[in-house]
Amino acid sequence: MTGPGGTGPGGTGPGGTGPGGTGPGASAPGVRVRTAATRQRGQAVLAVVAGGLAFVVAWQALVAGPVEVLERWVDAWRVGILQPHLAATLTEIVLGLLAGGLAGLAVGYLLARSRLAGLVLSPYIVAAQSTPILALAPLLALWLGTGLASKVLICGLIVFFPIAVATMVGFRGVDPRLVELGRSLRATPRQILVTLEIPAALPQIFGGLRVGVTLAVVGAIVAEWAGADQGLGVLINLARGSLFDTPLLFATLLTIALLGVALYATVVVVERRLVGAR
Amino acid sequence: MTDPAPAGPTSAGAAAGPGPGASPGLDAGVAVGPVREPGVAVQLAGVSRSFVVRPSGSLLALEAIDLSVRRREIVAIVGPNGSGKSTLLRVIGGLLAPDSGSVMVEGRPVTGPDPSVGFVFQEPRLLPWRSALDNVAYPLELAGVERATRRDRARDLLRLVGLAGFAEARPSELSGGMRQRVGIARALALGPSVLLLDEPFSALDALTRDRFNLELLRLWERTATTIVLVTHSIPEAVFLADRVLVLSPQPGRIEAEIPSPLGRPRTVADLDAPGVAVAAAGIRAILGTPGDPPSGDPPDGDPARGPSGAAPSGAGSDPAVPA
């Protein structure tokens, strides 16, 4: 909150509204814009840091303080409590993303291509999406057992919807004039799909993936709560229910949050590489 | 198919048709009816095409079009909105099938997009995620030409359209005119013998447009192609073309065929040549678009138009003759 207050008057004053902006000559504006942009970036970083500090200070007043949690986190990592659970959860997430993502891509494409498919499938897809996964998870664990399969399925289910919708929107939005260009160059349907439609739909698909990857983390934890013997969700239950280790509980939550950020960042990096500047 | 003709030296004029150029002569010998002369690049006979329109039924966009374009000729098509100009171009290019009639390009019946036809659209239609070079190389990539070869050729074509220094630029980094140049270079990638242009410069300002028209003629001289061009601008049509076809609206029919008064080669000065103005006035008269009054006016209510004023009621192609 200190950030925005500072940027408002400070940022726009000299850069944007300056009536002399056009006057002082051609060379000045370029330099001025750059320094304004740098300043803005600096202010953004400052705001994030300030927000984080405020959060930590408030946190200190609560049960398990940040120092305590950090110590516990380092300790748990050194002893090797966190790693196997992290690995288990990460495996579930990656497999769930893969399964749900591929299914979402396929169904999204189908929905974009076929009106009939849209009419037939949409009600089921929306109904499935509206059913709380939290209620569904124990059932699925009952049917599929408490092994990897039920986790991957729950993760996949939760990831499926945003990716399917994003894919549908992406393919529907492909410029038909580009497709006509492809046809005029005798591109085969496969070439049109690979060289025109997929690249054109990619920004939207990645939008869905960004949402999906964060949901996948939630899905994995929920699935583990429904019955599992490893995973960060299990560790939360252990720390809370049987160990009464509140610092470990928070250390686990911290790990989950960091995992989410790391996965999201991975998606962003891949997106930059594939979508690039357009 | 990757004939170097377009990028070749200026003298390549005679080597017009690459592979396909030789075939029509042979085919004609085997009694393919419609081909009357070996030098015909595009031939349409009795072509009609209609479209389904949701509420009312169907719309006849083209009716009984007969058209023959000689090799190396430039034909311009003008007409009001809805006269089927773009439809006609798409039928020639194999993007739309006619309901009836026959379409031949280089002596072969058109059943779909043909490798000897290059298409330049109204918008550049570049792939925004590809560099200029990769956009020009795109048709070669689709045709299975290997990477090094297609990049070399794309580089030659970019040089031909004056964009040698912009090979790695993204479309978003280029101006509107530059993008359309990339579009033209791409259309030349497969070494087509027929170039179809659908209002290619309509998005450009008047000055740029004049320059592009001159460049197009220069390109035409160097690449030995046959050009069929759709345009909204009557003076542009007269300046570029050997013949101007005037289409009537709904159904699109060839109302008149006006030869350009200009010889070749053409220069900037020809843009303002008196013959151009006279021919353009003749075409306007056929289209029934008098300068000031709305089109509802009877033709004789416009005394200021002089000899061409009588044209709209007349049979059609006469008014151009005095030119």
Image (spheres, rainbow, N blue to C red):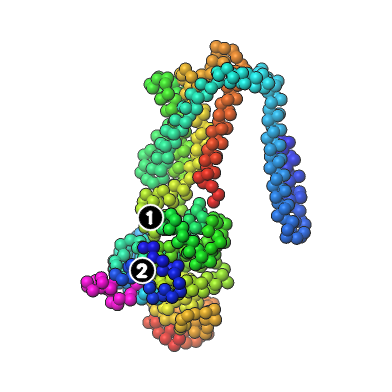
Q: Which amino acid type is marked by label 2?
A: Pro
Rendered view: A122 above or below B158: above
Q: Which residue is mark 2?
A: B18
Q: Is residue A25 magenta?
A: no
Which residue is found at the position 58% from the left and 29% from the top? A258
Q: Nearer the viewer, residue A139 or A100?
A: A100
How many residues crowd mark 1 within 10 Å: few (<14), some (14–19), many (20+)? few
How many residues crowd mark 2 within 10 Å: few (<14), some (14–19), many (20+)? some
Q: Nearer the viewer, residue B150 or B68?
A: B150
Rendered view: B173 above or below B65: above
Horizontal side, residue B176 vs residue B299: left or right: right
Q: Quadrant of the C terminus of chain B?
A: bottom left
Q: Which amino acid type is marked by label 1?
A: Gly
Q: Which element carries disc 2, helix, strand or loop?
A: loop
Residue B144 badge: 1
Horizontal side, residue B182 vs residue B316: left or right: right
Q: Please report, as a chain letter, where disc 1 is located.
A: B
Q: Quadrant of the N terminus of chain B?
A: bottom left
- Magenta stretch: give its range: B24-41
Point out the tag, 2 or 1, that comes first from the N-terminus. 2
